[in-house]
Each structure stands twice: as C-alpha cells, then as structure tokens.
Image: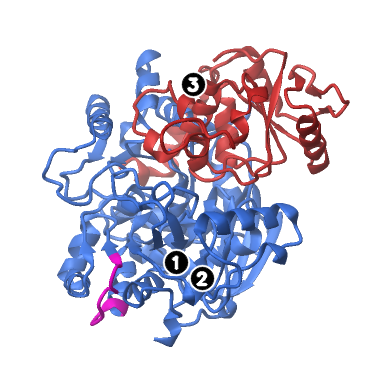
C-alpha cells in the first residue's frame, strides 16, 4: 500500500489501538517552555507520577523574558514566579533547561533545531501551537494542551485521532525578495484559517525543495495559521547536511542507520491525499496582512478590500470589524499604510537568514522619524552569529534597537508591546486583536518587507528598491 | 474530572466567527502557575472597559445570558494558540457546552480534558439556534450527551456526533492518563522495540 509521509510516521509510532479507545501514539521528543508547563508538573506531583523519559525533553524560557536589561531582576512578580517555577520543575525532574543565563537560551522553536534535537520521522510535541515548525525536518510535530503535556511526561504517549492529509503543491520559482513567509501567508489567504483544520499539511513542489532549512521552518511554523496542527516537508540532502554534526544529531554508525531510515520517509509515488491545494510560486508577491486574522492578507501591490468585496456574509462582517479595529479605510493602497513600530524576530522569523536579509535591506538607511525598529534574535546563538557577521552594527547604525533573545513582541507577554492605536510591521505569526498589546494594530510581513518599511515609514514593495 | 451530566441551561449567543484564543484569554493572564481562577479574565479585552467596568455592548454581559452554561458561537472557534488556559477560563466562567460548526483542533482536544462538550452543528442548525436565541434571549436548551441529543423549545434541536471514547470519558469524568496507564505493558514493549529500531534516539 502506498503511504504518505504522515501515514508512515503514524504507523511507526502506534503503540496500541484498543477497542473503544483512541489510538495511543508514541512521542519521541517533548519541548517545553514556562507558560504551558507549570500546571502539568503540578498535576504529576498531585498524582505522585514521574517523568517517564527525562532525556526526551528539552526546555527553555522564552515567553516572559525581558529583551533588555537582562541583568536586572525581573520586574513583573508573576512572570518572575513562572520563570522560577520552570527552573524548579526542571531541576526536580532532571530535565535539560536552557535558562535565561544559559548561552543556549532562546525561543524554543529556534533553539531545538540549532542543537539537532529533532530528526526526520520523529513524533514531537510541545505545549505550543508553533511546534509545527519542526515539520521542516520531516518530523510529525504538533502543539498540545497542558493536560496533554502532563500525559506525555507521565506515559511518553498521547491518545490521538488520525488526521486527514493535505498536499500543498507549490511549483515554479519565487520572485526575488518573496520568501517562505510570503508563501505561508499566501496559503493562509487562499485556504483560510480553518482551511487545514483536521489535516496535516505536506508541502511539496520545486518552490519548497528550493527553500533553505530555515525557510522550511518558517513555512511549517505557520501551518497552524492555516488551521493544520502540523506541516511536513520531505527530508532531503539539505536536511541531512543541516543536522550533521549538531549536538543531538546521531553520529558514527548511528548516523548511517538514521540516514537509511530518514531516506525511507518521503511519501510513496502514487500515495493519495484527502485534499490537494496548488499555488504557483511565481504568482506570490510579498504579502501584507491588513486585518485581524492571518487569512486577511494580500499582495503588496494591492489595496485593502471593502466588506462589499466578500459574498460570504461572515467574511464581509469580519472585514468590516477588522477595518474598524485596524483604523483602516477600504481601497487604501497597502503602500500608503504608515507604520509606527517594526519588529523582526519570533519563532517564525528570528533565525540568522532572517536577520541577514533584513540587514541587507537596512544597510545604509535610517529608521524613519517617529518609527521605532527593534530586532530580537531568536536565540543567543543567532545573536552571536549575527554579531560575528557585523549585522548588529548595520541595524544599530540604521537606528534600530538590537535586543536580547526571546518571544518578545510576538505575543507581548514580556513587556515589549504596542500601545493603543500603534501600528506595527511584524515578522511574527498572528495579527489577532490585542496580540501585540491591547489596541495595537499588527501587519504581518517578511523580514525584508519589515526592514523596508522601517526606513520608509510605510509599506513599500521591496522589489522596487 | 467532573462527570458531564444531562442538563437544561441558558444558552448565550456570540455570532462572531474565528474567535481566537488570544480573545478567549488574553496573554497578560497566562503567567499564573495555577489552573484555577481564569474565569474572571474570559474575553477580558471585549468584556471590560478601560476602567475595569463591564462593557455593556459585549454579548455575554447581557443580563439574559448570566448563568449560561451553553455558548453558541460562530465558525472556527478557538483558533490560534494551544493555551489550555482558554478552556480553563471557559469552564471556570461556568460554560460546559459550546455549539459551533467547527473548532480549531488543539482547542477541541483541550475541551474534553476539562469537562467541556464542544458540539459540532451544521451551518443551518447553528443559524436556527442563533435565531432562536436572538428572538428569545434567556432561552434554555437541554443537552443530553448520553443520547447525543440537543433539544430547544422551538424545535431546533438535533442529534450530534461525538467520538465514543471521548464521550465515555466525559460521561464518567475519567482521567486520560489513568486509561493510558492500563496499557503500560504495551508502552514498555513498544519502547524496547523502539530502542532497537532507532538506537540513535537513545544514544
């Protein structure tokens, strides 16, 4: 029987399918951060249960950490307690934690690939919806709730229902400065935020194989924005080259065994998917969201739609509500929208390639008057690499702030946030109401587009610079 | 977990679709290390004015919807982050049933871990229920999970589908981990085989 990559991983991780119960799936790797784990540890303690496989867990502290003045005590007492609780829980259970002072610290979905902790064919979970990132390696990686975090710690398994499969086929060549982020936004625009519900997406086609590993991570990261819990890209030579030599990657004889297994993972020719979506890479312009849902997105040469443009009454009403919240008028050209704050960072776009492209655009420019621009590396390793390449200097010379790593303004839990009415060009993943601060207005874009907006003070078509 | 029993309760109405978890429980309330006490923050940014007073324009602040246990809401409810704080807030506020055409996958799973029944309706069924509530605010529906049946005074009820395993757990208030532990021998056997097949994962 011909199988998709998802089906192969599912079959090899099925522990038991008892009658009348959900299938139990084995979990290879469990990632953790401070926000969604404390109640799970508490649950374990109350039930007098132990962490079954401590070596399967890698933990970091990222959501609540300040991105400046890291030497000072954490000002927010509730955040401080959450961070201390994480440290206590990891110590008590013998877990590997990259805490705030650790040179490996950073955003969980940046740190994990850096250390080669996830490999093709694994089942990977984390109490975080952007766990989908690791599908870039051909691992089945998905977000779970805190009760499930406790379940995995106790049993190394999860009761799961099998998902449907969706192939997103993207052929052709991307135009210069169109990126993985633009592909991800274009897909969400096409199928909607519920388009992938109940599915695992597999991305395939020339435009996908042409992406770097970092680009594939950006793409898979946002599978959840299209409603799919997981996204997958077939492992290939780029995947193997990326992993080789990293701390938790197999070595010696194990490398050869692992490689043989990894090469068996891609979808069999002729295997069938439940749903197929196709896009032409050449048609994908740099994208800008205009509303309060990632599906409210358009190309940079377009204008903001009017509620009358939608036949569907729900979409029409959502458009009207979004324009009201965003303080925008229908038919305004995207390039006429002014911005107040630029944020480059997050698990979507906080990797070295993101800062390289942004620095290329920012080089020799100045941040526009009344605009604040902040660059937040995804990890200390990204920060160091960027500094070794002199990128920090380019940003600082252009008037940007060069910060310490963390989730920062992606979800604004750490004090970095928009004020009421402030408008951002952000490389993060969600433009929900209030996500970056109550009353804040978020436009999602790629790092190149964000950097171009910083000096112009409004969105510009990066291809015209 | 509390067992889910048949009940007759007020149904509150929110017609909005794509309600995301950042709206259900805004991020400023995610720093707590406890599971309880999130209900007062449910829909915080919509529910309260700047000065902390109740926003009277917000649907759930209508007097007729006080004490509602059923939330009838637009498509794709609970999209966005995996935060279980969302169902914790919903349950702590007093809801134990949600009715919509669709839910985000992670949110849907999380509901069942917290004695919340997320009922999936068709578009037509949802429209009829919404219409019934808006013309008769404070109307009570009967939810019978055992028979997988929703009833309304105007006859807009329907039979709904729910996975049999999840249904049993809800009805009995069973803890998933306890059930999984019945299969510990199978997990041990799987893990032994796993160590041999994928030795690099255990190196």
**Badge 2 sits on which subunit?**
A
Q: Residue furthest left?
A: A71
Viewer-closest of A458 and A36: A458
Q: Quadrant of the C terminus of chain B?
A: top left
Rendered hue of chain A is: blue
The residue range painted magenta reads: A361-372
Q: Which mark is residue B184?
A: 3
Chief secondary structure of the magenta span? loop
Give the left or right position of residue B61, taking residue B35 as reference.
right
**Image vertical order of residue B61 relative to residue A197, above or below:** above
Q: Is residue A369 magenta?
A: yes
User: Label 1 vs label 3: CA separation?
Assistant: 47 Å
Residue lying at 59% horizontally and 75% vertically, measured from the top left: A171
Rendered hue of chain B is: red
Query: Which colour style is shown?
Result: by chain
What kind of element bears circle 2?
A: strand
Q: How would you rate the neighbour count of disc 1 (Cα within 10 Å): few for under 14, some for 14-19, many for 20 or more?
A: many
What kind of element bears circle 3?
A: helix
* Cβ atoms under marks 2 and 3 closer than 8 Å: no
The residue singled out by tag 2 in the image is A287
- Give the image location of residue A67, x and y in percent: 22, 51
Residue lying at 43% horizontally and 42% vertically, measured from the top left: A128
- Give the image location of residue B53, x and y in percent: 46, 30
Q: Which mark is residue A445?
A: 1
> Mark 1 against mark 3, which lies toward the viewer?
1
Q: Can I make out residue B10 in this image?
A: yes
User: Label 1 vs label 2: CA separation?
Assistant: 6 Å
- Going from N to C along the chain, the mark reached first, 1 or 2, is 2
């Amino acid at each position: 029987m011909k199988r998709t990559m998802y089906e192969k991983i599912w079959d090899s991780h099925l522990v038991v399918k008892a009658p009348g119960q959900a299938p139990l799936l084995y979990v290879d790797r469990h990632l953790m951060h401070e926000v969604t784990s404390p109640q799970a540890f508490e649950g374990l303690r109350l039930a007098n249960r132990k962490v079954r496989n401590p070596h399967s867990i890698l933990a970091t502290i990222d959501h609540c950490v300040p991105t400046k003045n890291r030497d000072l005590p954490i000002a927010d007492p509730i955040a401080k307690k959450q961070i201390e609780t994480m440290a206590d829980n990891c110590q008590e259970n013998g877990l590997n934690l990259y805490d705030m002072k650790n040179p490996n610290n950073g955003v969980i979905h940046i740190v994990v690939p850096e250390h080669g902790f996830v490999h093709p064919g694994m089942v990977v979970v984390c109490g975080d919806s952007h766990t989908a990132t690791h599908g870039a390696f051909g691992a089945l990686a998905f977000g779970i709730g805190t009760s499930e975090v406790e379940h995995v710690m106790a049993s190394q398994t999860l009761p799961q229902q099998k998902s449907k499969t969706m192939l997103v086929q993207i052929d052709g060549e991307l135009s210069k400065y169109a990126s993985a982020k633009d592909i991800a936004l274009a897909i969400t625009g096409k199928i909607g935020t519920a388009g992938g519900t109940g599915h695992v997406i597999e991305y395939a086609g020339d435009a996908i194989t042409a992406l770097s590993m970092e680009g594939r991570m950006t793409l898979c990261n946002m599978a959840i924005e299209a409603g799919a819990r997981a996204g997958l890209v077939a492992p290939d030579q780029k995947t193997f080259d990326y992993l080789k030599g990293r701390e938790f990657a197999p070595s010696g004889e194990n490398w050869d065994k692992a490689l043989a297994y990894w090469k068996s993972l891609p979808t069999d020719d002729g295997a069938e998917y439940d749903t197929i979506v196709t896009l032409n890479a050449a048609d994908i312009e740099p994208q800008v969201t205009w509303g309060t849902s990632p599906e409210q997105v358009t190309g940079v040469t377009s204008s903001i739609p009017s509620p009358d443009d939608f036949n569907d009454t729900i979409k029409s009403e959502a458009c009207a509500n979004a324009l009201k919240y965003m303080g925008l008028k229908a038919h305004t050209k995207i390039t006429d929208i002014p911005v107040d704050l630029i944020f480059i960072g997050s698990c979507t776009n906080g990797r070295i390639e993101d800062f390289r492209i942004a620095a290329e655009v920012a080089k020799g420019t100045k941040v526009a008057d009344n605009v604040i621009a902040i660059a937040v590396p995804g990890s200390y390793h990204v920060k160091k690499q960027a500094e070794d390449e002199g990128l920090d200097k380019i940003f600082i010379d252009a008037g940007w702030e060069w910060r310490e790593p963390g989730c920062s303004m992606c979800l604004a839990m750490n004090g970095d946030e928009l004020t009421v009415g402030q408008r951002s060009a952000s490389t993060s993943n969600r433009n929900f109401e209030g996500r970056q601060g109550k009353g804040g207005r978020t436009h999602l874009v790629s790092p190149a587009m964000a950097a171009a907006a910083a000096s112009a003070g409004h969105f510009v078509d990066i291809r015209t610079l | 977990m509390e067992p889910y029993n048949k009940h007759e309760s007020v149904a509150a109405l929110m017609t909005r679709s794509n309600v995301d978890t950042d709206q259900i429980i805004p991020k400023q309330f995610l720093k707590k290390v406890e599971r309880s006490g999130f209900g007062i923050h449910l829909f915080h940014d919509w529910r309260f004015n700047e000065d902390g007073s109740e926003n009277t324009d917000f649907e759930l602040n209508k007097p007729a919807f006080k004490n509602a246990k059923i939330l009838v809401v637009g498509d794709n409810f609970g999209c966005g982050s995996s935060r279980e704080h969302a169902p914790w807030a919903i349950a702590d506020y007093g809801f134990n049933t949600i009715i919509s055409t669709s839910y985000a996958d992670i949110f849907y799973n999380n509901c069942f871990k917290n004695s919340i029944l997320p009922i999936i309706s068709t578009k037509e069924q949802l429209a009829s229920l919404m219409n019934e509530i808006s013309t008769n605010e404070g109307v009570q529906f009967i939810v019978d999970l055992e028979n997988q049946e929703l009833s309304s005074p105007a006859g807009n009820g329907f039979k709904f589908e729910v996975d049999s395993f999840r249904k049993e757990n809800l009805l009995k208030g069973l803890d998933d981990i306890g059930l999984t532990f019945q299969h510990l021998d199978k997990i041990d056997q799987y893990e032994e085989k796993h160590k041999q097949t994928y030795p690099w994962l255990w190196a």
